[in-house]
Every structure is written in structure tokens, then in C-alpha cells.
Image: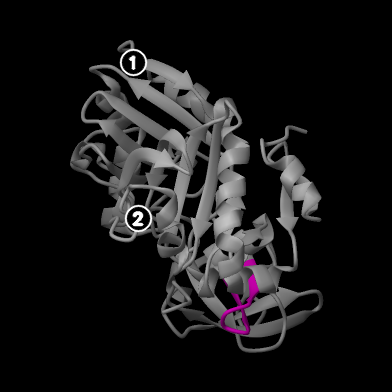
Amino acid sequence: MKNTPFTEKHIALGAKMAAFAGYNMPISYSGINEEHLAVRNNAGVFDVSHMGEFILKGENALDLIQRVTTNDASKLTAGKAQYSALPNEDGGLVDDLLVYCIEENKVYMLVVNASNIEKDWNWIQKFNTRNVEMHNISDRTCLLAIQGPNATSMLQPLTEVDLVNMKYYTFAKGTFAGVPDVVISATGYTGAGGIEIYFEDKDGNADKIWDALFELGTPKGLKPIGLAARDTLRLEMGFCLYGNDIDDRTSPMEAGLGWITKFTKDFTNRATFEKQKAEGVQQKLVGFEMIDRGIPRHDYEIKTAEGETIGRVTSGTQSPSLQKAIGLGYVKTPFAVLDTEIYIAVRDKLLKAKVVKAPFLN
């Protein structure tokens, strides 16, 4: 198992550790509910240094990104980011990712899922027919997500960058906690606001930033947060998790990601998705909440009252914010209408649920 530069910090704090995407990662510290609510109501710090980062440079960098991603990266100007996806040639997705424009038309950073770093690199490289300079900087890049409604105001003393007024999906490079050249990004996977910071793992930067965060933040209630609460937070927002809600077999049109699929340009397997948009899809990803008591889990079958299988659960949990069980799952399209009653097969019982609009939190 690989470690991040913060692994010893997590262990010293008593984190429950486990393998995730080949890394020894903190799953929880004080407990999922407490950590989840700390982020929703105040602020928390996630170590997500296991994520992958690629730099693409050169006059054909934008062209390559346009050909391998679904969203339209030509809309990006320096200092802006977008959510996108890498479609495969079989109608599914290689991964979802963030695209950062560092220098317009010339320099971009792609941020990919930890478990897909090698797969994504090889996939993009396969289409690199015009000598785009590619650098995999994943192993030397630290990434901390400081999320929550009070995160930006709490951390403002650590940087000259105006955190409080940063617009969603923009970023700036600046000094943070005395460390230069930190990419500070108004992004995150929790829907609670906050920032993500990228910096190089050298000269004790990891210790400097981690220590500064908690020296300033601990008196104000800043807490370290594990991956378990990250999962419940993203699920309350209806955000897809690769490997659960989207994968090599699910199309963006089925997953409700038509909004990041732009037919104003050519990209891998565009014709398939354009046809799906015009003709409709056989299944759709929906949000649902449980009516009967019980927690839906990944791969539980979704059925009708008569017991006909109409889909499967992709993600499910007991929502700490809502105090009810919620989930995402694919169902046959006729059953994707809001307020449709569906049933989750939990062991030998059919538990009633209903289709609701995601995000689950208003």
C-alpha cells in the first residue's frame, strides 16, 4: 500500500485506516455522523492526495482534451475549471474528471480518480497523436480539501488570495500558509462550499500546511474528516462516484450527465451519445429515499411491488443530515418518474422507497 504525505498524521490522530485505491487512507476519526455534520455545519479537512493529476502542455493540448472529454474545454479561460468525463468506445465512461485551464490553449491540469490513474493516463496517451507534452505529477502532488460553509472565512488569514469571494469552479495560484505556488480551487465533492488546495510534496510543505490549518482552525472547530463521511456528503448531493454510479458500461446520458456532454465538438463515441439523446435511453440513474426502514446498499436489486426486477442500487446510506435512508440507482426509464414507488430487495424483504429529485439536500 502507498502512503500519502499525511499518513502518519492520520495514524497519530487515531484514524481508522484502510486500503483505498492502493493507498492507506483514513476512513474515519471520531465517527461518520460527527465528521459529516462538522463539514455540513462548519468545516473539515480531507486528505485526498491519492487523486491523480496530469499536466498537458503545448499548442495541441486543448485539441487533445477536446477529443477525449465530453465537456467543451474551449469555454475555459485561465483560472477556470470544469467537470467532465472520458468516454470510452463502447458507450461507457473511462472516468470522470476535472479540467483546469492554467494557460489558455496551452497548459491544462486534469484531475482524475485515484483508482483510475494508470488507466486514464494510457487512455489519453492513446489519442495523443499530435505531440502534446504530458506529465503525470500524481506522486508528487498533495491535495487537501477543506470543505464546509465556514472554510473560506476560517482559512483567509493563511493566504493573500481572496478565498471568500472566489467563484465556484475558479482557481488561483498563490502562497498558502507560507508555501508558495499553491493552486487554490473553489471546488469540492461535498456541496458544502470550501476549497481544495494542490501543492508539491517537497521542502516539508505537507507538514507546514497541515500544521498551519489545524493551528488556526482547531479553536474554530475545524476537524479532520475521513473518506466515509466524504461518501455520505457526496451522496446527499447526488454526486456520482466512479465505480459505483458510473463506470465503463454506463453512458453519461443514462447517468444524468447530459449537461457535461456537448455536441458542439467531436469526441470519442459522440455518435452513440447523440443517438441516445435523440431517442432516449433504456435506463436512468435516479435518486430515491426509503419509506420503509432499511438501508439500501450497492448492488441490491430494485423491484416493482410485484417483484419484477427493474434495476439496481449503485449507492446508498443513512443520511446524517436528513436522518433518513437515501440512495442512487439505475431503473428502467418508465420507473424514473418522480414519486414513483419502487422496492429495494433487502435480504428476503421488499422495502418500499420512492423516486425523488437529487440533490437530496435543498
Q: Residue furthest top?
A: 131
> How would you rate the neighbour count of disc 2 (Cα within 10 Å): few for under 14, some for 14-19, many for 20 or more?
many
Image coords of residue 143 (percent x, y): 53, 41
| Viewport quadrant of the C terminus | bottom left
- Residue 295, image x and y in percent? 70, 76
Which region of the structure is painted magenta?
A: 316-327
Q: Magenta: predominant secondary structure element?
A: strand
Disc 1 vs disc 2: which is toward the camera? 2
Magenta highlight on residue 326: yes
Q: Is residue 115 visible to us here?
A: yes
* Distance CA(mark 1)–CA(mark 2): 33 Å
- Rendering coords of residue 166 (x, y %): 30, 55
With 26 as the anchor, is 147 left or right in this view?
Answer: left
**Label pair 1/2, CB-CB below 8 angstroms:** no
Q: Examine the rendering and report whether any part of residue 254 can be seen.
A: no
Residue at point 73%, 55% (across, down): 27
Q: Nearer the viewer, residue 32 or 162?
A: 162
For disc 2, the marked residue is: 163
Residue tagged 1? 132
